[in-house]
Image (cartoon, rainbow, N blue to C red):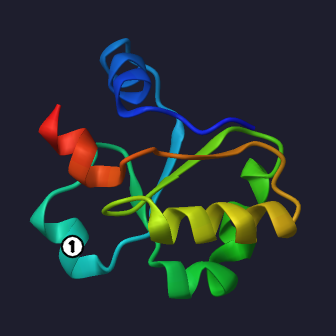
Amino acid sequence: MADITTTELRQRLQAGETPHLIDVREPWENEEASIPTAQNIPLGSLPEKLDDLDAWKDEEVIVHCKSGSRSSQAKAYLTQQGFSNVRNLLGGFTEYSAG
């Protein structure tokens, strides 16, 4: 699945959509600022949280971090675990918060 731009995500959230958002930054980063409705699951904790996310395997899941590096790893990992529609937020939270 193609990645998602911050503009597209912002438009969807403003339209009232509630996509499955996973913030793979560390808790302290999430506490400073976050995207509404994003669930904070640090990249290193994804393996132990897989069971909690099982219902989303065939649904769109958007992952993000600060710049896109960790979320790119999260996308690859989730895809390897059978998630069929994982999208990385291009530019990460840095670009999202700048818009």
In the image, is 37 to the left or to the right of 98?
right
Question: In the image, is residue 81 above or below residue 89?
Answer: below
Sort mark 1 into few (<14), some (14-19) or many (20+) by Cα contacts within 10 Å: some
Residue drawn at 28 percent across, 52 percent down:
93
Name the spot of residue 58 as percent of width and height, x first: 83, 43
Question: In the image, is residue 20 above or below residue 29?
Answer: above
Pick the residue in front: 37 or 93. Answer: 93
Question: In the image, is residue 48 above or below residue 96?
Answer: below
Residue drawn at 67 percent across, 68 percent down:
52
**Three-letter residue code for mark 1:** Glu
Quadrant in the picture for the C terminus: top left
Q: Quadrant of residue 8?
A: top left
Residue drawn at 11 percent across, 66 percent down:
32
Image label count: 1
Q: Quadrant of residue 51?
A: bottom right
Name the spot of residue 18 as percent of width and height, x first: 47, 30
Pick out the residue farthest to the top. Answer: 15
Quadrant in the picture for the N terminus: top right
Name the spot of residue 19 as percent of width and height, x first: 53, 35
In the image, is 62 to the left or to the right of 23?
right
Pick the residue in front: 93 or 42. Answer: 93
Determine which residue is flagged by label 1.
29
Residue drawn at 65 percent across, 86 percent down:
48
Say which element carries label 1: helix
Name the spot of residue 49 as percent of width and height, x first: 63, 78
